[in-house]
Amino acid sequence: MRRPRIAAAVAAAVLFAAVGIVLALTTPWNPLPGRVPGGHAKADPALDFTPAEIARSRAFDSAVNPPAYAGLLAGLVLVAVLGFTPLGARFIGWTTARVRRWPLRVMLAAAALTTLLRLAGLPFDIWSEHVLRRYRLSTQAWPAWLLDQLKSLAVTWVMYTIALLLLYALVRRFPRYWWAGAAAGGFALVVAVSFIYPVAVEPVFNKFHSLPRGPLRTELLAMARRDGVPVKDVLVADASRRTTSLNAYVSGFGSTRRIVLYDTLLKSPPARIESIVGHELGHAKRNDVLWGTLVGALGVAGAICLLHLLLTSPRLLRRAGIDPDAPPPAPPGRSPDARGTGAANPRSMALLLALVAVGTQIGAPVQNLVSRRIEARADAHALDLTRDPSTFVSMQHELSVRNISDLDPDAFEYLLWLTHPAGPDRIAMARDWARMHGTPVPPPLNR
Ligand SMILES: [Zn+2]
């Protein structure tokens, strides 16, 4: 087992180094290049938000943080206990005791583990939902909310089952070199999922329709043409059935790429909507979704090579309650599954999920750091396109107030949750843009 392990280690190192180099070279570390006459504007919530708005944001933040942190911690502790002690293997053994065929064992184990983890998170999700309701951000009744949870669990089941069946098939067939095929397959799967997500998964949760004909649609498509981004349509999602918050996004790439506006946004003045769409066009023009998908897929491929090293470690397997050299026990009267030893034993799935959870948690701060720079570049694009920093500032103000965003996140919140710069940071950048382009600098809104 030494040679394949060394090869997997080298492959993991090369792939992670590639991700690091690509991120270092292509992340827009300075999203608004050039000198700002008079120096950078300061990000200060007090400039543009009233004391009441700031107080409300603080109160909401301290109400949503406990369920968010407690849920994250509880999920990590549970998955670690299942994966790094024999408990998870025992749980899988119990749920799959009556079946012998390995694909059925994998499917049952995947369903049982994802359901258990989701059930453990449910109290925290209910707690969060209560807070959203108290602040009138959620518009859902409990039955509709529960249906959403079930749909999301079903989507998780389908995705995990496909990925895990492919993985265990490879591990069984190629016990020494499965990591090479799995890394290539993982890369392809990430790209495929990102491509079909807008047409296969998003419609499970929302209904979409084209932005109706009218001055707004005409203006938005004209802006896209001016920008040189081929956009045939702008879609509206029925987000108001779930939330009062405002949002817009780009998903998919190639023929599945779409710009989506929340229907909640349509009540805002048209110039503000143009400012938002200008940001989304920035993502489309730079192919941010495709870029993120490819870098993410490269990271997943590296992680799979690393996973091979961990899943073939006899020490780690024993710790997870799996005999590295023996197949899983067979149902009474059946012969044991000779190929299902070590990592190929479906009981290793708890260890696998624990390793994936730890890896995802380690990767999140890096992802968020890069995402914030890309979002800032899309903001700069919106400013270049609309040349209207005042409207940009009023839109960012409206976004922060309506979504009750954190106006002053601490370092930990930046690390764990913030995919976008905070509202005051985005507003400060618009003031920088105005200074650089000699246009009137948007005055503080809180005057
Ligand atoms: Zn964005």
Image: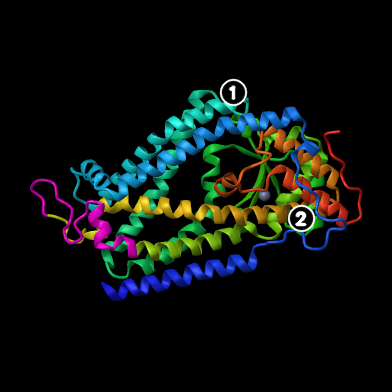
Is the stretch drawn in magenta largely helix, strand or loop?
loop
Magenta residue span:
309-335
The residue under label 2 is: 381
Q: Secondary structure at mark 1?
A: helix
Q: Is residue 231 visible?
A: no
Q: Quadrant of the C terminus?
A: top right
Q: Give me the residue at 13% from left, 55% from top.
A: 336
The type of residue carrying mark 1 is Arg
Q: Give me the residue at 40% from left, 46% from top.
A: 158
Q: Nearer the viewer, residue 384 or 194?
A: 384
The part of the image, by quadrant, that contains residue 6 is bottom left
The part of the image, by quadrant, that contains residue 95 is top left
The reply to whether dot 1 and dot 2 touch (C-beta < 8 Å) is: no
Give x and y (percent) for residue 253: 61, 57
Q: Is residue 241 left or right of residue 78?
A: right
CA neighbours of label 2 inside 10 A, class few (<14), some (14 to 19), many (20+) = many
The residue under label 1 is: 134
User: Is 412 in the magenta?
Assistant: no
Q: Nearer the viewer, residue 312 or 61?
A: 61
Give x and y (percent) for residue 223: 81, 51
Q: Nearer the viewer, residue 120 or 256?
A: 120
How is the structure coloured here?
A: rainbow
- Identify whether 446 is placed above or below 10: above
Q: Is residue 187 left or right of residue 372?
A: left
The type of residue carrying mark 2 is His
Give x and y (percent) for residue 349: 31, 51
**Depth-wise, is mark 1 or mark 2 nearer the camera?**
1
